[in-house]
Image: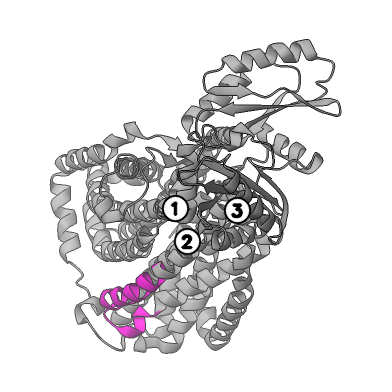
Amino acid sequence: MFEKLGHLVVRRRKAMVVLFVVGILTAGGVGSMVFNRLDAGGYSNPNSDSYQVYNYLHKTLKISDPNVVVIVDTGNLPITDPTISAKAQALEAEIAKAPGVNKVISYWNTGGEKTLAATDNKAALILVYSEGEAFSPESQNIGEYFQQNFDGKRDGLTLYSGGTSVVGNAINHKISKDLSIAEAVSIPLTFILLAFVFGAFAASAMPMVVGVSAILGAFFILYLISLFTTVSIYALNLTTGMGLGLGIDYALLIVNRFREELHHGKNVEDSIVNTMASAGKTVFYSGLTVLVTLMSLTFFPLPFLKSFGYAGVSVVAIAVAGALFGLPPILALIGKKVDKGVIRKSAITPKEDGRWAQTARVVMKRPIAVVLLSLIVLGVLAAPIKDIAFSQGDARMLPASNPAAVASAVQDSRFASDIATIEIVIPNGVGKENEVSGYIEEIKKVPGIVSVVEPQVLGKDLRIIAYESMLPRLPEAQKLIHDLRDLQSPDGTLIGGIAADYTDTQDGISQTLPVALGWIIISVLILLFVFTGSIILPIKAIVLNVMSLTATMGALTWIFVGGHLQWLVGSFTLTGTVDTSIVILIAVVVFGLSMDYELFLLSRIREEHLAGKSNIESVATGLQRSARIITAAAVLLAVVFAAFITSGVTSIKMMGFGVAFAVILDATLVRALLVPALMRLLGERNWWAPKAMQRFTLKH
């Protein structure tokens, strides 16, 4: 199949290049419209009790949470002072006239509602209600307006604007700005490194062709998806990072093999055909492995994680298509001119038996010592994982100096309870007064509950509001919700609110995780078996990837839970937890990329083994011919993701560090040391498979 594709590429090279360019330009033009359709939320589990409560209150009863919370700080005067009251009422009137505002509730217009007053009685809240669900584009527009017009000093008062609309807009704006900076840093630096790695300007442009096409094509697919469902703005970071990264990976493999064939005396057509039959096949199976791994993100109920799944599958599919249908016809057109603009001659004609082959032979002379030493290093890196604690992102993921983060910190420190309360709905609760009364008394006894408001009658239903003493997106709040749900309650009782939403999100991830892991393991085992013809190698690959991933999670825990190395990764608000969704994302992306490099290495080792070389020589030669590509790809991919470390949003910073650290660890310690050592220990058993299964594998 791949040989036929190679011949087709050579025959139709001009037409294929024109179609490729037109297709990508069209995709980029249409895909650019996705930026106005992105969402900053997506953390809620739509299959949960809390989501049912949300729909009941917001859509059926039209009861909503405030989009904006304005804190009015009076300085040294009490909020009951007549002068302050007059200023506050004037401020309320102005806010009520703001675009999109439907309703305003405050300490002053409610006659002194205690929950809206600060503990020191020198600050109070104004709650602003408007159109647009939390984190939607409409909601973020309101947030932007309030941050620009109702934040800072005003008429002797200090205003702090916060709430979901303001935080959502702040995160959206910060990520977009940080993404521009990251791209401005990573793209020029990547091109310089590519020129050094390829040794010639013409060849170094090829990865950018594939990378940019993957990004623009993925934007087009994400735009189409956004017409039917929610797509998170965070998916942009994965799209650009994976697009450039995979573009570099696959172009390195294709271009390197094409040049190798040319340097062995083949003509352009034969070089293309041989490249497609070897490197092209590897790219296809590698991309398929990464794709099915990232597809697991779509299994989770959270639109946030689904968005990354959509982005990951899209960018991988387009990267593979670009590497197989866009890059080869370009190479067929330029032929031997691929080496034009020489910068480093040694990169154009690498040694057949260089330092990587020598490294492999040294490793294979002492495989047990190398394995033990490598395991010790991985164990030390993984050790901090025992301290990992999970939560969900909130305003603290923004820089501490960001006005939205400041407003959130002021509210948390100066107000006794969060206005995001626990909502309890009892369908058909009217007529069950005795049972409900007993239930309320039990609620009051649960640790963490501050007070419970008398039931509100809503037709035949009852609504109970409970106030908690903790932030709603922490493990303690999750335990509180579990405790409440364990109580004996009237039939059909539903518990909602932010803490319940967070709990249902965490529980949804926990319940889906085994299915996602099962999908990844089974699909990867099958694909690697088909590609390698071995039962042993796929199992070994998964075990090594899990070990590498555990070490990465240990490093992330040490930095983002322990608070170390802020001089390197930049300052962030230390919460003592990591965002569960981001950890899942990093784990899946890292696992997929690790398999990418595993296939790069195994494809060359298998090729040498099929040519009749011994196990030792196959590993040495395979490592020599692939390790340079793997290391270069890892360094370049690390540069792309390391640029995200400059982000002021902690979750993006963590993703950038996690992926960059993992690919470097994988390409050095794992691929260069552990893999050859274990292959030496296993010998010819590496390639064993039952005869009955061998017919399902690739023959060459």
Which comes sooner in the sequence, label 2 or label 3?
3
According to the image, label 3 marks what residue? 165
Residue 367, given in percent of the width and then of the height, sits at: 17, 43
Which comes sooner in the sequence, label 2 or label 1?
2
Find the distance from the CA under tag 2 to the CA under tag 1. 8 Å
Q: Are marks 2 and 1 in contact (CB under 8 Å)?
A: yes
According to the image, label 1 marks what residue? 398
Q: Is residue 132 left or right of residue 176?
A: right
Query: Residue 572's mark?
Result: none
Residue 595, given in percent of the width and then of the height, sits at: 40, 52
Which residues are drawn in magenta?
Answer: 182-205
Circle 3 sits in a helix, a strand or a loop, which is it? helix
Q: Residues within 10 Å of mark 1 (few under 14, many from 20)?
A: many
Residue 289, given in percent of the width and then of the height, sits at: 48, 53
Q: Residue flagged by tag 3: what amino acid is it?
A: Ser
Q: Is residue 293 above or below residue 315?
A: above
Q: Residue flagged by tag 1: what amino acid is it?
A: Leu
Find the distance from the CA under tag 3 to the CA under tag 1. 14 Å
Image quarter where the C terminus lies is bottom left
